Every structure is written in structure tokens, then in C-alpha cells.
Amino acid sequence: MGEHEEYGVARQRFDVADAAPLLLDPQGVVTGWTGEAGRLLAYPAAEAVGRKLADLLTAEDAQRVPDLVERCRRDGGWTGLLTARRRDGQPVRVAARITPAEEAHGGARWLALLSELADAPGWDMSRTVLERMVSDAPVGIAVVDTDLRFVWSNAALEQFGGGPPARRLGLRFADVQPGLDAQAVEAQMRHVLETGEPVVGYEHVGRVLSAPLRETAHMLSFTRLEDDRGRPMGVYYTVVDITERHRARQRLALLDRANESIGRSLDLTRTAQELADVAVPGLADLVTVDLLETVLRGAELTPGPLVDTDRVALRRAGNRATEECGPEAVVGVGEVTAYPAGSPPVRCLTTGRPWHVERLDPLDRVWVTDLPGGRRPTFSELGLHSVMIVPVRARGTTLGITTFFRRHGREPFDEEDLRLAEDLVSRAAVCVDNARRYTRERDAALVLQRSLLPHRLPEQDAVEAAACYRPADELTGLGGDWYDLIPLSGARVALVVGEVPGHGIDAAAAMGQLRTAVRTLAAQDLPPEEVLAHLDDLVARSAREEGAEPGAAGSAGTQCVGAGCVYVVYDPVDGGCSMAAAGHPAPAVVLPDGSVTFVDLPQGPPLGVGGPPFEAVELSLVEGSTLALHTDGLLARGETWAVDAGRERLRRALEGAGPLDARCRNVVDALVPARPYDDVALLMARTKRLGTEQVAAWDLDPDPALVADTRRTATRQLSHWGLDELAFTTELVVSELVTNAIRHATGPIRLRLIRERALVCEVLDSGATAPHLRHPRTTDEGGRGLLLVSQLTQRWGTRFVPDGKIIWAEQSLTELAELPVAALLE
């Protein structure tokens, strides 16, 4: 069967309902004739029966009949195109399908179905030309029917694996390429079948049968095939190998990530770890970075490769491995790594040149001689089969080595991989050398690191947040303004913006102290006014202990005196919001309709200077409202400025629309010059509400007999939420918290479950004393309730509310809650 016939069948769908049937014996002689066949070829039954099939075809196709008969016997049938000859000698184009038709007495016959293709385009083109077009094409080509089963493919498709065209017939994509994501490819095919819109340039990455160890990339294009009536009959698609282009993009992306990730600090081990993190898993399965002890101490080194390697001490500064690499393959960060003389790592240190082997000897043992337990496994035991070692060199000095391994199941390293590894290591080496040169300034660098603003805001579901900070001192980039977002219990969140007087490293260090203090106080679930009161007391006490008066210059502690801060707590369950301020501008609120208002917030004194107590205000925010917390630098225009004028400018800037992060930057760009008079920090938070299906609450009677019913109620709620795996732990937590409330408190009790990023269990009672975690002795009959809660949950705590107190506990929704229980029961 020629490929042209299969191609033609794919171009013109075979319609059984319109086909003319006839019967053939095993030798290809007509034994049964129908009226449809007579109307198609104009032969009466008397003349047609007994004729050979070859007599009904043109001379060219008649020569193919013996081959067709043989293919039918071998493959159990045949489908393709033929040119038949009418009784008057006129040719007629037909699509033919021949299938076996066994008789009741066991005889074998063949059923031939002929369907006229009078208007098939391209039929007049030379068959030889058509056959060469598809058979000699370097592009893989295939046709699938409406069931996405192969009906034709060319020889070029064999290069991707899956066997010759005949073996593909009737199979699905997943049958011939199990290593690829067949669902994604077939989704494209279905889209083309349903819409008729072609898909061009669809890129797909995976492992084909012809290269099971290598990740390959292909570009596929899909086109729907239709009959004369426009009905879909299948999908025609082409495949082009674009692996090299894909790998080039991967290398560029890896180098881009390296530029962004490596060298973000002056910390040696962090830089080494960043190098390992970037290379896994994109380049290797296991990466280790070993630096000289003298480098880690910041000592000066002799330029060039190492000479006396017998006295060289290396220490593991960074490593990263995929999950498949066992712990034996990795020496912990900070541990000494000893390599025997003459081993490849030592040779790289002495020569200063890289080294790589595509295939390691599986019986060779790892080069590190001081693994835990003294055991040195073979590379085969660790599943490692290919390696690269690249010296860490900068400014002509060898600082250490970086080793890259690949496991079995991935292709070995090649020269392109080695060049990429050298590029990565050379970029990291400069950063390592810079860190070494400035190790003597470590204290200043640590202060700077602690004082930096958050790189990203924590994930939570209470608000959508964005922040922008612009320092006044562009040379140092350090200032005293800061912002923070702190997740609290009960799905709530705290928003904080503050500022410390002055600029430079002292102000940054003071800002770091205040941020740490605020986060510590926030963890105690205190109301905003109490947080500021404790913070004010802390600043004043620190200043007194350092013997400084308010406003005096000095250490970071005295620098905090006179600082301003606004602290906001938002609850996504009911939209409640409470806030208090200490010498700081009140937040603005942008309602969903775009109108802007400023909160009428009582101003407390700046921190540490003394004055009246702080006051808080409470308000309810509509979902979609945006809180804008800012420092006074956002309103300032020079040394003197009017609050009202600054607020009006801010109001106009906040009325814009768009994504929150873009709006945040646009507000700062609109109000703050490139070299501002003061530091500027802006934190914007668009409020969300938890749906009613995420919160369940019950009022309970203080009756110990009802604890069992309460457990069952909580279990039913978890089942409704699809959290059955947390049922056992939640039953224990609910039982302990409710029982404690009944025993130690009076008045009403309320149980509330919140399903957010964690499952939160809260029990409200009217008691005024917080519970304490005890460690009971073996002989004690009680006191284990909160111990169980602390062991079974991710975190727990207590917060006081006007009606009493709430004891809460959280369970992660990403981990099985049963695991800690099993550990306790052992």
C-alpha cells in the first residue's frame, strides 16, 4: 500500500453510509454485486460477478492488486484510494476499504466498500509527486480520525519512536509515546476538531521513545480535515524537533535566573547555596560547593591554582539535590570535606581547570572520605552516572570547587553543559570573592541585611497587598521607613507602616529593631492600641537604659525615640478593621466605587516620648475596599508642607484604576520625585471576605455531656468541606478546647471553624485567664489537653476579646494531620 493512498483517505473521510459494497473471494474475484456497485461502475451483476478486481480498475492500479491481496491477508484489511473503470471505460476515483467477512460455514471472503471521490482536490497531481511529498518529507506527518486514532503517518515520524506507520494504525497518541503528556496533545486535537481553528507552533516537551533519557522539545501544528460537506473527518498534524532551540532557551533562562539569584548578599555560604539552588534541577540533580577554609575566614589568598593540596582544608558551603538523591550523597553545609590526593576534585584545585566525565565507573566510590558512619557508597548505589567539576576562580585566585552530578535516567553531561556550568560558576565566583573581601565589614553587612524591607509579602487570603519603598539617600539605599504584613490567628492580618527619624545605617538598624518588636507583639494577638503601648514602653525603656534623652543621637536604640507607626488589624470573616497610630498619618480608604476617604484616627504621641494613651478606632470595610498606609514622605513637598494639600494630591493619585501593584508604583511616581526629601513607604491592601461556606460557628451550652455531640458536629462540617483526613485530629482538638472552656470558664461558649490556608479551630469563652501549657508527669491524671493540642496542630494560642478570650489552633491543609497522632500513639 502506497503512502499516497493513505494520505488520500485522510484527506477525504470515508463515509460507510454512501459506500457501494461488493464481495471478493481470497483471490480477489468478485463473488457478490449490489445495486450501489452497479450504479457506481455501470456493470450489471451478471457481468460483474466472476470478474477479477483488477478487471474493474485502471491498468496502473490493476498492477497493484496482488500486493493489495497480500496486504489484506497479512494486515487483516486495507484502506486507501483506487481508480476504478466504469463499463464505458471512464475512470472514477474511489476511496476503498477492504475488511474480512467470514461466512457461517467458515469460509473466508472479503467485503469491499467503494465511495466515490469525484471532487477530491489534488487528484490530478502525479502520484509519484504526492508520494514523494509525504514519504520524503523531513517533517513528521500524521493523520488521526475523529476518535484521535492514527489512520496514517509518514516515515519521518519514526525518528521520534513508536514504530513504522503500519504499527501506529488504530492506536492513540499515548500508545505510541507513553513518555509524553498525551492529554495535552490530544486536547489540542480536540480543540481543532471542535472549532476548526488550526493550532500552529504548539510546543511540547517530554521524552520520546527514540530518546528516553533525553528531554526533547517538539513544535506541532494541527489542522482539521473536512469532507465536501464541511464535516470533520480527522486531524492532520506535523511534528518538528526543536530540542536544540529549547535547550538554548533553557540555558539563557538559567543564566538569567543566576543573574537575579546569585550574589544578593555579602554572605559567603548564602552565595554558594544560591549557586547550588540555581543549578538544580535545571542543569544537574546534585550540586555541591566546597570553599577553602581561608576563604570563609576572609583571608587573602595567593593568586593561581593551589600548590600544597595536602594541607588544604575545604568546607561544604552549599549543596542542593533533587528528592531522588539520597542523604548519603550530600555532606551537610558547614561540614569539612576531605578529598584524597589525586582524586578529580584535588586535580581541579591544583590545575585550575574543569573536568567532566560522561559516564562514571559505577563501581567507583565517592571521593569524599569523611561521610557520616565512615561508609563510602559507590556511584551506582547513589544512582549517579555523570559528573562535572568546575573550580571556583575569581581574579586569578582559586577559591574552591563546584561539583555537578546527574542521576541515571538523564542524559550525560556534554560540552555544552560544561560551558554552561563554567559560566554559572564564574558569575558566582566573583560574588564569593567580593564577600570574602568584605568579610571584615560583616557587622555592618548584617545590620544592613536585618534592616532590609521584606522581599515579598507573605501569602494569605485576607487582603491582596502591594508595597513600594523609595529611599531619600540613593547612595546607600538605607532609611528608617518600613512596612510589614503579618498573618495573625483566625485568618486575620496585621498591616504596619512606620518610620524612624534620620537616614543611613543607624536609622536602618533602628528600623530593624522596631520591625522585630512589632512582629513579636503581633504574635501575642494584642489589640492595636496595646501593641503601640508596649512598643512605646519598649522604646522609652531602651533609651533610658542607654542613658540618652529623647531625640538624642546615638545607637539604634536611641534612634527609635520619636518614631511613628500605624498598626491595623483586618478580619476577613466579618470585614472588621481596627487601627491605632503613634505620631503617624492616618490611612486612606479607597472604596470599591473609587471614592477616597481618610480615617478619622486619633493621633497618639510618637514612640518613646511619653503622652496620653493610644486610642483605636474600629470600622467595617466593604469587600474590595483598599487601605493605603503610608509614611509622611508621601505627602511632603520640601521642608514645609500642608497636610490638607498633601492629602488632596494623594486622593487624586489613589483614584486611578488598574492592578494593585501597578497602582502602588503609580501613586509613588505621581507624588514623589526621583530624589525625595524624605524616605517614602506605601502599603496598599485590597480587602477580601471569606465566603460563608468557609466559616462555621456554633453556640454551645456549658454541659460536659454535649462534648461528644460537638465533636460529631465538627466532623460533619469537615466532611462537608472535604477535609476528612483532618477529622481525627480535629475531634481531639475540639474535645480538649471545649472541655477546658466548660471546666474553667462560665457563661456562653462558642465554637468556630475557619477553612482558609489552614483549618482554624476557635473556642470562645468568658474567662479572663489564659491557659498554660503543662508537661505532666506519668502519674498525673490530667493536664495533657493543651500538650496534645500543641503536638497535633501547626500552632496554637490565645487572644483576648471584649467578651472574654479565644483559644485557637491551626492545622495545615497541606499535610496529613494524622501523622503527629501516630507519632504520639507509638
Image (tube, rainbow, N blue to C red):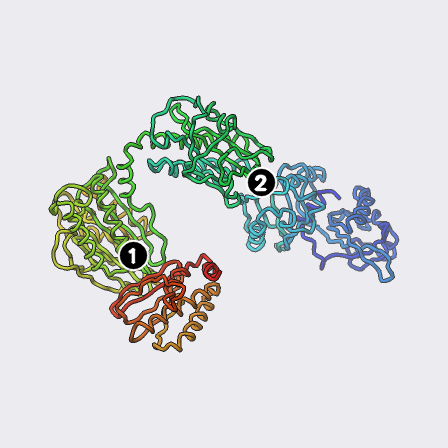
454 left or right, relative to 503: right
Amino acid type for the residue under numbered disc 1: Ala
Amino acid type for the residue under numbered disc 2: Glu
Which-is-in-front pick, marks 1 and 2?
2
Residue 316 % position (x, y): 43, 36
Q: Is residue 592 above or below residue 53?
A: below
Looking at the image, which residue is at 13% across and 45% down?
A: 547
Mark 1–mark 2 Cα distance, whole angstroms, equals 47 Å
Q: Give the numbered dot on residue 523.
A: 1
Q: Is residue 557 above or below residue 600?
A: above
| Res. 34 image quadrant | bottom right
Question: Element under label 2?
Answer: helix
Q: Is residue 343 above or below residue 798?
A: above
Looking at the image, which residue is at 34% across and 47% down?
A: 456
Q: Identify the residue position indicated by label 2 in the image.
A: 381
Q: Residues within 10 Å of mark 1 (few under 14, many from 20)?
A: some
Q: Are marks 1 and 2 in contact (CB under 8 Å)?
A: no
Q: Give the numbered dot on residue 595.
A: none
